[in-house]
Each structure stands twice: as structure tokens, then as C-alpha cells.
Image (cartoon, grey):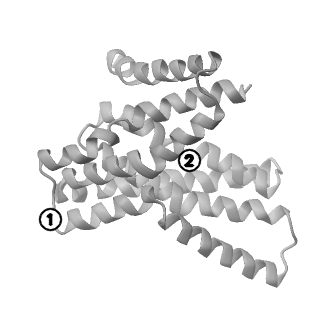
Amino acid sequence: MILVLISALLPIIVTLCLGYFSGARKDFGESHSKILNKLIMSYSLPMSLFGGILATGRKVIFENIPVAIWIFIGMVGGYLIVFSICKFILKNSTSLSALRSLTISGPAIPFVGPTLLGFLFPTETSLIVAIGSLIMNVVQVPLTVILLSTDSYELSASNKNRKINNLGLDIISAFKKPVVWAPIFALILSLFGITLSPIWQKNFSVLGGATGGMALFSIGIILYVKNPS
């Protein structure tokens, strides 16, 4: 088990350190990290998820329905639990409670998932990352955006309607992102029995395979630039 943990975590640590070192050398900065993130979220990760899900097959997808349910319970249930503790026990503001809830219950699965889960669950990695990404982008992030606005104005009837409209716009905006619609489209195709042969899968894995490394490298740059304590 120790060997498994080291094999899974060491590449993450090494790549993070390389990104941090590149920031310290001034080879890359915050602007470069933003470009990498855009490349990851708009191109490499959607391609990785699309190709991976189509290669997974319908049988494996049905076998992992309980996994999807538990991921949803863990992420959404965790969000609500943390929010309740911060809001009603620690007496934090609504916006601060929302931020802490997203930070704690929203794992960086699009960034760390391909590397870590790819080692532990090589067959189901794309499916698991896709499920986590969908829950984060369609449920957690829009909900957080709405909660963040509650401290900026009082809850009149018109403001409540505005929040409902904003929630709808946030969800629509989420579905326009390639990282959201690409795995959904691939899931639909897979349920209809459409799969990718290894030859065609290479079209998605060349760029998609770089997702984990670029994401971790970008995080390392941000760690140096922001210097969190």
C-alpha cells in the first residue's frame, strides 16, 4: 500500500515542484498559468474526457452508476454540511460560508484527477473525472455564485427573482463550456453503443494525455505567485 501511495502521489509532487521552480526562476508567471488553464479547460481536458468515456464502453458506465451516486452525495452533501457548520455554528457570513464550502467539498478533480485516479483506476478514470467535473460546474459553482451575492443586497422579492434568474444563467453558461458538454455528449453516444477503437482514440489522447501534467505545473506556478500561508 505504501508503494501504491508513493507511486500515485510522487508524480503530483514532482510536477508541482517543477511548476513552483519555474515560477521562482521567472520562466513562467501568472499570465502563463491563466493561458495553461484555458488550454486545459477548453481543449485538453474536454478531449481527454470525450475520448476516455467513448473508450470506456456502455457496460462499464452502467456498472459505475453507484459510484456516480456516491460522488454526488459526497460533493453536494459535503457542500451542504460545511455550509451549515460555517453559517449556523461558526456564524460566518453567507458568502464566506459558500467559499469555504466550495473549497472543502469541491475537489480539484479536473486538475489532479487524471494523474492520481489514472494510476489507481486506469479504466474508469475519464468517467470519474467527468462525473466530478459535471457536479462541480453544474451544481457547486452556480450555487456558490448565487450565495456569494446574498451579502451584497437585501432579500427583497425582486432580488429573489434576480437570484433565480442568475442561477439559470449560470447553469446555461456552465453547459456552454467544453468541459461540461463534451463528456455529456460522449456519455450519450456511449449509451447508444458507440465506442472508439484504439486507432481513433489516439486523436483525443495526444493532447488530452497532457492534461494532468499541464494542470499540476500550472498549480505550481500559482503557488509561487500567490505565496499562500
Residue 209 screen position, x and y as percent: 32, 37
Q: Quadrant of the C terminus?
A: top right
Mark found first going from the N terminus, 1 or 2:
2
Q: Which mark is residue 185?
A: none
Amino acid type for the residue under numbered disc 1: Gly
> Which mark is on residue 106?
2
Query: Quarter holding the N terminus?
Result: top left
Residue at the (70%, 49%) spot, across then down: 99
Compared across the picture, whether 143 is left or right of 15 comes to: right
For residue 210, above or below residue 164: above
Q: Amino acid at mark 2?
A: Gly
Q: Is residue 145 visible?
A: yes
Q: Residue at x 67, y 77 (%)?
A: 164
Which tag is nearer the camera, tag 1 or tag 2? 1
| Separation of residues labelled 1 and 2 (CA atoms) | 32 Å
- What residue is shown with label 1? 193
Q: Nearer the viewer, residue 120 or 66?
A: 120
**In what element is the residue under mark 1?**
loop
Query: In the picture shown, does residue 200 fall above or below 115?
Result: below
User: Would residue 107 be seen by someone viewing this image from the given angle?
Assistant: no
**Which class describes the residues within 10 Å of circle 1: few (<14), some (14-19), or many (20+)?**
few
